[in-house]
Amino acid sequence: MSAETPPHRFAWPFDGQPYRFFTNVEPAGAEVRTAGGSWGATVFQADEAYPEVIAERREILRRRPRAAAALPHMHAAEWDALTWVFERFAAEHPRVATADLTDPSRVRWRNTVTGSELDLTQDGTAHPLAVAAHEVAEDLFLLDLRDGALRLDAVAATFVASWSSTFSLGMSFSDLHGPIPRLHGSGMVARTERFLRALQPGEVVRRLNWSMQPTGDLDASVDARHTWPGEDDLRRRVVADPGTLRLRIEIQHLTALPATGAILFTIATQLTPLARLVTVPEWRDQLELVLSELPEDMAAYKSFADVREPVLAYLSSRSAS
Amino acid sequence: MTTYRVAGRRSGGPGVLELTLVPDDGAQPAPYVPGSHLPVRAGGVVNAYSLLDDGCRPSAYRIGVRRGCPGGGSAWLHDNARTGTTLVAGPPRSAFAPVLSARSHLLLGAGIGVTPLLSHLRAARRWGRQVELVVGSGAGRDVFASELDDLAPPRTTRVVGRAALRAAVREALSRQPIGTHAYACGPDGFAAEVRSAAADLAWPAGRLHIEHFDAPQLDAGDPFTAELGDTGRELHVPAGTSLLHALDAAGVRLDRMCERGVCGRCEVGVRSGDIRHRDLVLGPADRARGDVMLACVSRGSTTLRLEVP
Amino acid sequence: MRGDDTPFPARLTVPRWPSGVPDLPRALAWTFVRAGCAGSARCAIGRWRTQEPAGVVEAGDLPAGFFEGRLVGWRLAVCGEAGRVARVVAAATAAGLLDEEIVVNVESTASARWFCPACGATTTVPAGAGSAGCDGCGRRLQPREHWSPASGQFLCDAS
């Protein structure tokens, strides 16, 4: 599927400075103005792409049921997540959905877009996180403090980028970030984990992450890679037309759930081809600065090291000056 | 910090006061994780009090306060908190939460230490958790007795006196199925006894959780003065106000993101003065040099002279 | 503030087993598990038995009900071949044991367990293999240097 986010709600991640990892967390809910429009007023996205994204989400969950999985002790945290997600979504998008949570052990949910009418009870709902994932466009993850570390103990995710959430189930926050360069020696993972452990219910924070992707697939997980063309094919396509390369944005939200203290992590994914982004001159300039300067190990991690030159040439050819 | 109004006051047993607090502005109180405490400012000091309910969609906060030494915050509350009294408190903090992966939960309490266990018991009932309770009190000094009668799980041991409690705790610790987590709350001596019994029985440290009635992680701090660069301007930073916000009020806006001492964006240079660092960003070398601080959480223990444009 | 610009490499998450035979910490009771343990010179069971009395279980897979009736204070010590030890440790962790309740000695490394991202199946391969067919879907698997202590498996790319 080729979902494309138009510039007017694209979460532009750069600020005119070279890019390095840093713990870029901020309180959620504040709208951010960009050169192309704005983003960030809500945690959950229910825009014009929502019905299409939900349909794809459900198709992947049907085809690959293990995309939603949880360790047995996570039922309470999953229910906690379901009620938080439904309540927040309904508050943010009252014309799309309503949630009745008068009794904390029961949820009644109506979604006018998906047509869902659910009457769920805490004890009678087998996989609450999966139920929630059927109704929202975001990937959902639960982190639990177990044996001295935060661990990824429940997932309901169909749109992850270049990693496998199914493989990562049960892994510690530190271990599952192992493959990312420059993160460990700098103490950033430990610092981020300390921050997450200190989150308290009611606080919702967010951060952006970005990478490059040669196709428009929301599902770029390791689990789906065997359905993709080979690396060489993909590279040839981008070299032939660098404007088709996508900037992939993850809008990540984090909160501590009120009844269990488990950490809920949501990721909304946006994908837009460079050809569309460079129509905003400020973005073209900032992208050129970031991509030309990024050290090789990070460029490899962001999936564009082997097409850097043609992409820079393309960006330069689109310069207004 | 939020202003709360006392909506109810009643006895929780000899020398123990139960207060019900509601936000003064009529808002719904924030939910909290079972076992959380509320940092309350009373009589000029901040003390942490355990919240008694399970924290799910609370309509009010209930806390249990044991009369402490004269001049302390708890004595002040006993003497002064009446229905309608307003109090300032920070948000609830969770540091004694039930472990989700526990196969079974053993709750151990002495005296006023039963208060966070009441919160655990309510949560255990909600989620159908397997739980065992051991509590002890002084003769005739039962705390929250009727609430305990109501919440006590089938496996409950209630004893009177220190020696009986010590024996009951040791006996319970000796026969818990693997996968159990134990939670202990009580006076310092009790915590030490539980620790020692658990060590004798080869309990791994990771299965034992002790509630300390410590001050909250970030207290309001003491007031201090900041001098702004070469301007000669002086800024008063009151207790409970961050340097970052004090600078905002003075028209000096620093970059920021997390306001939690994590992202490092509100770093500000310091020319002189002693810094009380409370962030998670600066390393030992930065701290030793003492020439930078994070304005969102760190404070001065003397007057600070800042590098401010 | 910008992050430090030192190019720290990715932290590869490969298994890190203890290098020598670890001593047993204090416990109320022990069970020793031979997981593909060949009783070679590097076997720990003999030495552990001089330290603590314990039942010894022969198992690649732990028998059903193995953890029932165990009390806090009991510990597990596993000796054997890396791939099978990893499997026992994952099962013990899933049963709720903490890191400090499990002692491990790897006597040899002869096998590894691979996770197929295409179908989710596990394939056991000889240690050091560069690729293999997936036992579940037959696709070609190539391992990454990314190992999960939770499952005792390496993540692979499937093609």
Image (cartoon, coloured by chain):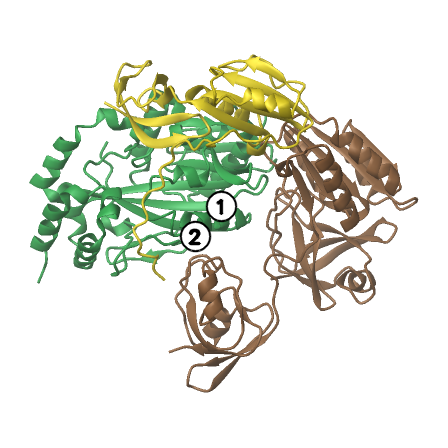
Chain colours: A green, B brown, C yellow
What kind of residue is marked 2?
Ala
Which residue shows up at 68% across the image and 59% down it? Answer: B40
User: Which residue is identified by label 2?
Assistant: A28
| Residue B141 placement, left or right of C150 | right
Tell me if mark 1 has few (under 14), some (14-19) or many (20+) residues whose alpha carbon lies within 10 angstroms of its own: many
Query: For the residue labelled by badge 2, is the local secondary structure a helix, a strand or a loop?
Result: loop
Quadrant of the snapshot with the C terminus of chain A = bottom left
State yes or no: discs 1 and 2 in contact (Cβ < 8 Å).
Answer: yes
| Residue A219 placement, left or right of B92 | left
Q: Which mark is residue A255?
A: 1
Depicted B241 relative to depicted A87: above or below: below
Percent across and percent down for residue A263 are: 50, 41
Q: Nearer the viewer, residue B57 or C10?
A: C10
Percent across and percent down for residue A151 are: 48, 36
Indicate the chain on which mark 1 is placed: A
Whether labels 1 and 2 belong to a single chain: the reply is yes
Q: Earlier in the sequence, mark 1 or mark 2?
A: 2
Q: Nearer the viewer, residue C107 or B138?
A: C107
Q: Is residue A124 visible?
A: no
Depicted A215 relative to depicted A26: above or below: above
Could you say which quadrant of the image residue B210 lies in?
top right
What kind of residue is marked 1?
Thr
